[in-house]
Image (cartoon, grey):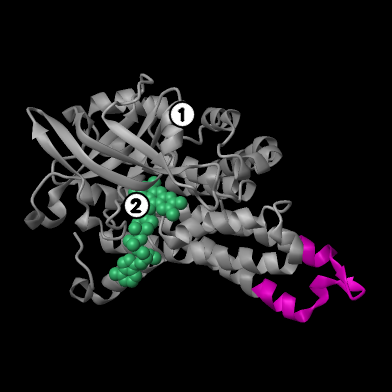
Amino acid sequence: MDFGLTEDDRLIRENAREFVQKYVIPQRDKISYSNSIPEDIIRKAAEAGFIGFTLSEKYGGAGGTISQMSSIIEELARGDVSMALPVYVLLLNGWPAMLEKYGTEEAKEEILPSIAKGRTFFGIGSTEPSGGSDVMNEKSNAVRNGSDWLATGEKVYISGVREALGLPGGGGFLTLLRTGDKKLASKAFTTFALMIKGTDGKVRNQISTTLFNNIAREGLSTGGFSFSDMEIEDSYRVGEVGQGFHIIMEGFNIARVYVAAACNGAAFEALDMGREHLRTRILFDQPLGKQEGLQFELSELYGKLESSRLLTQKAAWTLDRVYKNKERVPLSEQNLAVSLAKMTGPPTAHEIITKVMVWHGAAAYTKDLPLGAAQGGVMSYYVGAEGGINIMKLIIARELLGKEFLSYKSG
Ligand SMILES: Cc1cc2nc3c(=O)[nH]c(=O)nc-3n(C[C@H](O)[C@H](O)[C@H](O)COP(=O)(O)OP(=O)(O)OC[C@H]3O[C@@H](n4cnc5c(N)ncnc54)[C@H](O)[C@@H]3O)c2cc1C
């Protein structure tokens, strides 16, 4: 076993760290509190190769690994603890990867290079008002219209609606739609690249959008879109008819590793701030860090962060065996590694950030420090984004006990 980094891995992490110092830290407050990630940061992130980093060079990507991408995301989250930028970048790596693997050549050539240039957004459209955890009960559907499709339904709490509408090359979502009878269970779903604004810059007119008023992560929107008899050309179908449920579960596994990496990054930064505060804050004539009680807290939190980072690295390494080395890794092994990382990352980050806020006293309750933004940012992944923590626990239990113990219906 080797915990060291290859020369390539080291350079990629250093490059991300330099990017953060140069472009992210100076605009940190703007990202956290101004309802958008400054355009120049997106452009520079694309130029640096961070967007679509794992796509193949043919489509404008860098052919990078999931482990390398995770290290970039961790560094971005250290710079933007509100999570807007790391989440923007992680979505634009996780979901385009599914389009590259399963999409038609026509859709890939149109959308993927534009994503890699930072001109087009591409996220995930799964959640519906009936509940994000209960994917098998989702109702939005598509029916055949000649060789193409007519789609009707509603998606909610979707990251990137404002961004998809705002970018010159538009954007859309790998959208899960019901294409078959309920009896088909997980095989009743198909995924489509549903573009709410085309790469030609034209907003689709059969679609209406809305935005939610988020408590945090303000730089990246969540919104919804509804559509009625919306035409989707068959070339935008991603994968076979009936394969959609499995495609989004595969995409979730990749995205969940990145989510854990983002949470680790925010926690890492918060703990660094906490250490500095314990060293420098003088109370009762001595540094706060001289208090043994707080030293114990620091040590425990550091251990939890290290554990979370190791779980994330193991999950990334497991998926690299699948996607880079083309090894046949059993799905149960992939699910376990990924769900452990996603189960651990957000609560650990939330605990660390909350403790560091307490160490800072009243100052933590102002926007002068980024800790409140960080706490709200990681909370998105606690309550549900990319799968709630309880869902991760159910997946782990399913792998440990067997499918027959599952308390809910799954594909
Ligand atoms: C900031 C943010 C961004 C998001 N971005 C996207 C996006 O880009 N695309 C997208 O499709 N969705 C997105 N989501 C939605 C996210 O996927 C859902 O929040 C998630 O799937 C949970 O669904 P829900 O919110 O409807 O909660 P529910 O499904 O109603 O679940 C509520 C709670 O119950 C728990 N729970 C559910 N079932 C069980 C069970 N059987 N046993 C025990 N506990 C259970 C869940 O873990 C959760 O904590 C986003 C959410 C947030 C907060």
Task: Work out whether mark 2 precedes mark 1 in sequence or the reverse, and give the earlier one.
Answer: 1
Q: Residue furthest top?
A: 200
Q: Is residue 25 left or right of residue 65?
A: right
Any mark on residue 252, and which? 2
Q: Nearer the viewer, residue 317 or 344?
A: 344
Give the residue displayed 26% in from the left and 77% down from the top.
Answer: 401
In magenta, the rendered stretch is 276-299
- Label 2 with label 1: CB-CB less than 8 Å: no
Q: Amino acid at mark 2?
A: Phe
Of residues 287 and 148, the one nearer the viewer is: 148
Residue at disc 1, CB closer than 8 Å to ligand 1: no
Decide if residue 198 is on the left or right side of residue 27.
left
Residue at 67% x, 43% y is: 29
Q: Is the CB of the residue bearing disc 2 within 8 angstroms of ligand 1?
A: no
Q: Which residue is mark 1?
A: 166
Q: Amino acid at mark 1?
A: Gly
Tell us which disc is closer to us: 2 or 1.
Answer: 1
Q: Does residue 60 appear anywhere in the picture?
A: no
Residue 204, how many percent across, how many down? 30, 26
- Magenta stretch containing residue 297, yes or no? yes
